[in-house]
Amino acid sequence: MSALNDFLTLINGHLWGVPMIVLLIGTHLYLTIRLRFPQRYIFKAIRLSIKRDKGSTGDVSQFSALATSLAGTIGTGNIIGVATAVTMGGPGAVFWCWMTGVLGIATKYAEGLLAIKYRITTKDGKMLGGPMYAIERGLGCRWLGIVFALCTVLASFFIGNMIQCNSISMLLHEGYHIPPLYTGIAIALLTCAVIMFGVKGIARVCEGLVPFMALFYVGGCLWLLGINHEYVWPALKLIVTDAFTPHAATGGFVGSSMMIAMRYGIARGLFSNESGLGSAPIVAAAAQTRNPVRQALVSSTSPFWDTVVICAITGLVLVSSIMADPGIDSTAGATLTKVAFGQIPTFGPFVLTMGILTFSFSTILGWSYLGEKALEYMFGRKARYVYRILWISATFIGSVTAINLVWNLGDTCNALMALPNIVSLLLLSGVIVKETRHYLWENRLDEEG
């Protein structure tokens, strides 16, 4: 196991090195320019996300699809991940994390469009789609679609399940002395109660859970910004200036260069919103929508909420907290987060605990759907029952075992998901532009597709 872990660490060093970051950011920039900056439609997209497309085809509403997608992306990366970026890359890392969200809007738009464009309808009227269908139907390359689907299934168990369960059980054990065995049983039962109802059950829970957890967590962050109000503006200026200039170790911050800030900020941002990794389009394909561009716009709001809003607020809270108390230990992400939220009298630890619990559990639900549909692509509809049993079992196993190896396995599978997805986005960019011109640039958003 130790040898395998070392090997995967070496592989991931290459897979998630500078070339992958450049590829993802390059794709974001390319699609942003070619699609004429779809970020400018973000408020139109938000309005569409809360409206129902009556009479349109699909399994769940556009908002339910968005909530399920956000459930899969909003996780501990929005809290601990941002803190790690600050501890490793300095305040400037927050700016580059934020930029990945802004640019990622274009890629999420493109992914959502292809999800609807190439989705299929099963014999019982269910919608199936995602990068594997875009690769097969748009590029005529089923074997590459299978590679993507296989990596998605594996990533769902590692990143979307066992790591999240382990985070929950360790948090409850360290903070409240609850044995991991009890946590594992509770998570398994709760997960079973939701996923056995399929996409509609998952979407219904996520539709209520995601807005609650986001508002609850953001409310706690705003409370902290109120406590440190005199440091908020200086923190914002430091985040921007430190993103472009070298910063010596001072005032509670580690020393950092522009390249280090970019590296950690971009990496954490990409992991947070998953733009380009290909997970969100699988959920988007189930949405009730009149045409591909309407759902593309709704999908584009995911990195806005996930990274532009939540990650940015988290970063501002952490930087302002360090400026308010330079004695804070800013060398460890988890410790920094705990100390920052500890500033809220009495309720601080509870706000952080609830944030991590709800973010992690929603990720378990969101990824359960992604993995199930990827498995269904490879083996047919009957495979979903086996998958659900394995999924529930994995929630228990992840809660009670040490999973250092799983982190590396998950990172590997995520990278292998991203590569075929980016290939399809780039090769099918002409289709994306054509659909966008017809429905969006020529004002035909209400037209049936």
Image (cartoon, rainbow, N blue to C red):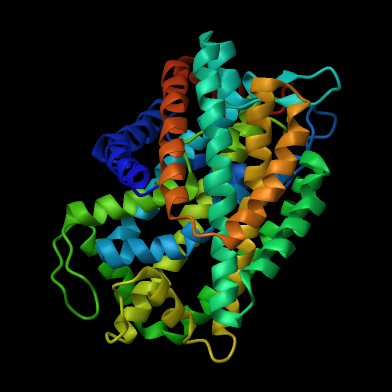
Residue 97 at x, y percent in the picture: 37, 54
Of 138 and 84, the residue lying toward us: 84
Residue 115 at x, y percent in the picture: 61, 26
* 6 is higher (above) or lower (below) than 142: below
The answer to which image quadrant residue 129 occupies is top right
Q: Residue at x 35, y 49 (%)?
A: 2
Give the left or right position of residue 208, taking residue 348 as reference: right
Give the left or right position of residue 87, taking residue 73 as reference: left
Can I make out residue 42 in this image?
yes
* 373 is higher (above) or lower (below) than 134: below
The answer to which image quadrant residue 378 occupies is top right
Can I make out residue 435 in this image?
no
Residue 346 at x, y percent in the picture: 58, 91
Q: Residue at x 27, y 63 (%)?
A: 88
* 57 is higher (above) or lower (below) than 11: above
Of 160 and 257, the residue lying toward us: 160
Residue 176 at x, y percent in the picture: 61, 81
Give the left or right position of residue 147, taking residue 260 as reference: right
Q: Residue at x 37, y 80 (%)?
A: 321
Q: Residue at x 39, y 73 (%)?
A: 318
Q: Quadrant of the C terminus?
A: top right
* 20 is higher (above) or lower (below) than 425: below
